[in-house]
Amino acid sequence: MSASFSFTLEKTDGGARLGKITTAHGEIQTPVFMPVGTAATVKGMHPESVAATGAKIVLGNTYHLMLRPGADRIERLGGLHRFMNWPGPILTDSGGFQVMSLAKLRKLTEDGVTFQSHIDGSRHTLTPESSTEIQRKLDATITMAFDECTPFPVDRKGAAESMRLSMRWAVRSREAFVARPGYGQFGIVQGSVFPDLRAESIEALTKLDFEGYAVGGLAVGEGQELMFKTLDTTTPLMPAHKPRYLMGVGKPSDIVGAVLRGIDMFDCVMPTRSGRTAQAFTRRGTVNLRNARHMDDPRPLDEHCTCPACRNYSRAYLHHLVRAEEMLGPMLLTWHNIQYYQDLTAGLRDAIANGTTQQFVADFEAGQALGDLEEVPVYGLGK
């Protein structure tokens, strides 16, 4: 627990960055994808299974954990690492996004947000100070500053007001953060899709000298092209000697494109949520295991994948599990999707290290463009 929180930029290849984050709970090689464990669990997976995919850090959420089972209870039980049996680093989202998207009858003021729980209607208030304190009680390795996630679309005036409120909250979050060896706090860049507002936000945050910086307010409906355009003007202004985190992203192509633009860290519910709805990510694009075309297919989901779903089971069996609504189906597909995302970021790390990032991206795009394997002919149908 004595290690200092630090980021080492080891190599660049164009805009892509290879790095290492050192924390109290272990090292993280970047670019990195963080599986989402919102309520102290990555849905459908044992912690040991998550680690087996190569994941080094997971994400928890302040809003959900403060409501159930409660930050005080988790603190009494030894903190989130012990509570969920994850000894590695944990990043906690501040809860701002969930308050805006899930809570009932929320009221936003300069002080913070008062809201009714989506679980039982009980009233709560989150402020920069209380969010930061809850994350300390959870024993989060990386604490996020409390912010307002600016909706999209939004006009420039609305984006500016929202961003400046978040910057005032960032000051209060930083003042409330209790510095400890190996722990860090990230500020969140806001400003929607307006380059000058993003620049103003970065300038305000860098004065506070956070351990890392996140890009918030993207992947909220603006589309990939506008997201990349925003990153093109945002990431060059962010401190090069600190980790850069793109929140809530995303699809595999989003991650590849954002790495090319200098992003180091990612999280998204997509691989786990998709696994629960029979969607699998593969090197040839997305596969829907609910489709009847798989019912007689003896081949693996992805022959290049080492996860149990691909190593031990056929597409026909996975299809059967999905159609029969057996819980093993979502479990296996979630494992596969997390494995795919870990393999993707590991491949990006290797490519940056070898100076072959552009070739990696070309191969990735070519594979995705192939589409899924041709359907297996069914005996006797002459297909």
Image (tube, grey):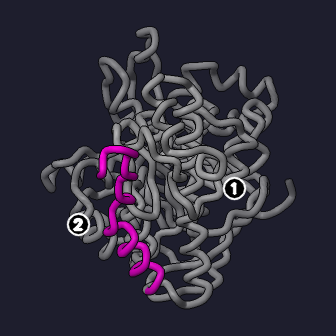
Q: Is residue 108 left or right of residue 184?
A: left
Q: Is residue 368 left or right of residue 300?
A: left
Q: Quadrant of residue 334?
A: top right
Horizontal and vertical percent position of residue 188: 44, 55
Whether residue 204 is situated above or below residue 323 in the rendered picture? below
Q: Is residue 294 left or right of residue 29?
A: left
Is tag 2's residue or tag 1's residue first in the polypeptide sequence? Answer: 1
Q: Nearer the viewer, residue 359 or 190?
A: 359
Horizontal and vertical percent position of residue 260: 42, 77
**Which segment is the magenta one?**
359-383
Tell me, for residue 225, which label it has, or none. Answer: 2
Identified at 59% across, 78% down, the residue is 18
CA gap, disc 2 and disc 1: 30 Å
Whether residue 15 is situated above or below residue 194 in the rendered picture? below
Q: Quadrant of residue 67?
A: top right
Say what amino acid the circle numbered 2 marks.
Glu
Say what amino acid the circle numbered 1 marks.
Lys
Residue on which the image places disc 1: 56
Identified at 39% across, 52% down, the residue is 376
Q: Does 360 lie within the magenta span?
A: yes
Q: Nearer the viewer, residue 257 or 150?
A: 257
Identified at 21% across, 47% down, the residue is 152
